[in-house]
Amino acid sequence: MFKQQVQEELADRLGLEVRVCHYPRGCSKYNPIEHRLFSFISMNWAGKPLRSFEAMLGFIRTTTRRAGLEVKAVLNEKVYAKGRRLSDAEMATLNLERHEVCPEWNYTIRPRLASV
């Protein structure tokens, strides 16, 4: 579903070429943003009860660093459908080119010439 949304909402609608590179499962430890930020969030809420989303967001929003980092956080309350998958026929309509390295995780989605 993600690929279809990127195709329709970004590539086709805005005429953008979108290069997507996912982290493989279990590899978010290599995400430099998480390394630079999450430890400070963890220190900020250490030992404090996380009894509500608002409390959690408050701790995230008040996280600071000496470098003047400003952290913004919002709660996304949208309900997403679970278990929806694209059929092979729907996948075939995407203008998707897989990259040579890790083709399941790295690909480019280009605008389609004619709207599908």
Image (cartoon, rainbow, N blue to C red):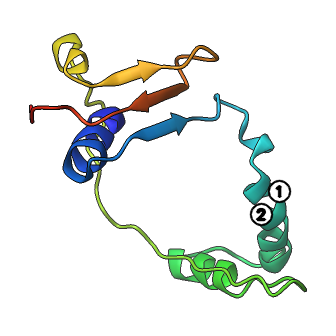
Check whether the beta carbons of the residues at disc 2 and disc 1 lie within 8 A of each other. yes
Residue at (23%, 15%) from the top-left corner?
92
The label on residue 38 is 2
Can you say whether 4 is above or below 9 in the image? above
Query: Residue at the right extreme?
Result: 66
Q: Could you say where residue 41 lies in the image, as x and y percent from the top left?
A: 77, 72
In which quadrant of the rendered image does the N terminus lie? top left
State the CA–CA distance, disc 2 to disc 1: 6 Å
Q: Secondary structure at mark 1?
A: helix
Residue at (80%, 85%) from the top-left corner?
64
Residue at (76%, 82%) from the top-left corner?
69
Can you say whether 7 is above or below 92 in the image? below
Badge 2 amino acid: Phe
Q: Kindly indicate the quadrant of the structure image that contains residue 115.
A: top left
Q: Could you say where residue 75 lies in the image, as x and y percent from the top left?
A: 45, 72
**Left or right: residue 95 compared with residue 37:** left
The label on residue 35 is 1
The label on residue 109 is none
Badge 1 amino acid: His
Q: Could you say where residue 10 lies in the image, as x and y percent from the top left?
A: 30, 49
**Left or right: residue 44 compared with residue 58:** right
> How many C-alpha atoms fall within 10 Å of the one at disc 1: few (<14), some, or many (≥20)?
few
Residue at (62%, 17%) from the top-left corner?
102
> How many C-alpha atoms fall within 10 Å of the one at disc 2: few (<14), some, or many (≥20)?
some
